[in-house]
Structure formats: C-alpha cells, structure tokens
Amino acid sequence: MRNTIHKSEAIRIILGILFLLVILAFYPFRLLTGKIAFSPGESGRASVMRVNGSRDLRQRFHAQYEGLSEIEVEIPQVNAGKYLYAALLDENGETLLDRYLLIGSQGGRVSIPIGEKVEVGKVYTLLLKDCFSEYEVRTLPIDPSVPTDGLLQNGEVQEGRELAGAFVYSVPLSKKTTLLGMAILALLFLVLQAGVSRYYKRFPEKDALYSVKKVLRTVLYPLLAVFFCTLFLLNFPGKAFDDRWGDLLFYGIGILITALLSFYAVGHETFGTLQKESLRLSRWRAPS
C-alpha cells in the first residue's frame, strides 16, 4: 500500500473529492433545494385565538408541493407553560407526525419542522394543542394567495380567518439552475487543477513528499473543528436544542465527548505505526 504522496497530488485529489461530492449534491441526490413559502399578507385586522387544555386549533390547507419543509405560526403571548403540541393530519384525520416544541415564556414566531412528503392537491390539517400550557396564536384575514381550507377551534369554523405564519415547501432546483451550477463548478475545478499543476511545475522544490496519514489529518482536523464548534454554538448560546440549563449542560458534555473521540480516532497512532517508528529510530541509532 502506498504510504506517501506529493503535495500537489494530494491537493488535486482533495479538490477532486470535493468537486464530486458537490456534483452529487446537485444531482442525483438533489440535496440543494430552494424554498417556497405561502404566507398571508398583513392586510386587515389581526386577532389572537387561545389554545389550552380545553381549546385546540386546526388549520386545514391544500398541499402545493411534495416536500413540506415546515409550518410557521406566530405566538404573541404565552400565558402558562413552555411547550406546545403540533401534529400533521391527513384527509382522514390520521396523524402523520407530531411534535412537542419549546416555545419558551416569551413566544414569537415558531417553526414547526415537518420534513414530510405530501400529495399535491390533498387537504392536510395542522393541529395545535397545549402541552400543560396556554398560549395565544395570531390569525389574519384570509389571503386568497394562501391555499388554506378553513380554521377551526374545537371543531367550530372561524369564518374569514387563517393562521398568521407560513407554509414552507422545499423544492428541488430547476434543471436550468442545476446545469448552470454544475457547469460553473466544473469550470472552477478545471481552473484550480490547472493552477495547482502549473504552480508546482514552476516551483518543484515546494512539491514535498508527505505521508498519506499526515494529509488526512491536515484535512480532517479543521473540518472536525468547524463541525463541533458549530454544534457548541448551536447548543449555547444558540439554544437550538433546548433552553433548560440541565439539558444544555447534558448536550454540551455529549458534544465534547464525541469531539474528543473523533479527534482521537483521527490522530492516534496504531501499534503497527509505533513499531515501525521504533525500528526506524533503533536503526538510526545503531553504530555503522
């Protein structure tokens, strides 16, 4: 097995791997998507509807695209508790998914993650209930551009009203945008490859020989550092996972342990490597 590699070759291979991963994200995996949101305009008088142990709220809507990413609702006031219960129901009232979400004590615009494939044109229902809590949900007059199909509280239709917020769909990039992006990436890749090749031909003394393990460590260390630093910031002060100090501490310890294990896995020396290094040193010290 090859254990060493020239610096220029390592750079070209890394660029090639990154290029391949981004191209696969474009197609066929289509991980790069756009967002389309349907949100009522701020026309007319806003009002609030209370949700608690004896009152629920149901917003019916027509699915416009297959990928329902999230539904946003506006909660201007929380009277008790810190959580809400949300569920997505199909046409028959069957629960497709449900969520318990932290809304805190101040409320605000709450994003309910869905990430579910839906059938275009069918009617679905967003159900909002309490979770040992009481909160108020903002509503607006019906906007014809938002494909809703009735707002109900405890089964009673609220005429002319719909939830303030947004229905957010995740849609694949268009073919034109996908092809353009792939073409730009291919051009950038070729320019970088040519630049690397030309540079090291001009300065061959800089094209040092490195071990494959050192190259991997050089690449993986900063990637792991960025990844785990991002997780730490999301946990605190971002409080993306929870806002209770006990949970924040628990998640922080879990992230720290995972980070240490990851860095150890990348940086530790195997017994075979240590044996080879010991043999090399003993030969160097041995008298000729």
Image (cartoon, grey):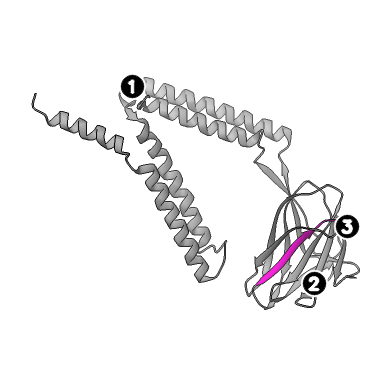
Percent x, y of residue 145: 85, 55
Q: Which residues are magenta?
A: 83-91
Q: Secondary structure at mark 2?
A: loop
Q: Which residue is mark 3?
A: 144
Answer with the quarter of the image where residue 273 lies.
top left
Q: In the rendering, at what x and y percent does residue 54 appear?
A: 79, 78
Closer mark to the observer between disc 1 and disc 2: 2
Instruction: Give the mark, 1 or 2, whose residue is nearer the N terminus.
Output: 2
Label 3 to label 1: alpha-carbon separation:
67 Å
- Judge whether residue 123 can be spotted in this image: yes
- Residue 41 visible in the picture: no
**Residue holding disc 2:** 56
Q: Which disc, if any, is residue 204?
A: 1
Q: Which residue is at 62% across, 37% downward?
A: 25
Q: Residue at x 82, y 49 (%)?
A: 64
For this view, does 50 lie left or right of residue 92? left
- Report how far apart the C-alphas of labels 1 and 2 lie in the structure: 72 Å
**Residue 238 in the image, given as x and y percentages of width and height:** 54, 62
At label 3, the amino acid type is: Pro
Which numbered disc flags the more N-terminal residue, 2 or 3?
Answer: 2
Q: Nearer the viewer, residue 204 or 60?
A: 60
- Tell me if mark 2 has few (under 14), some (14-19) or many (20+) residues whose alpha carbon lies within 10 angstroms of its own: some
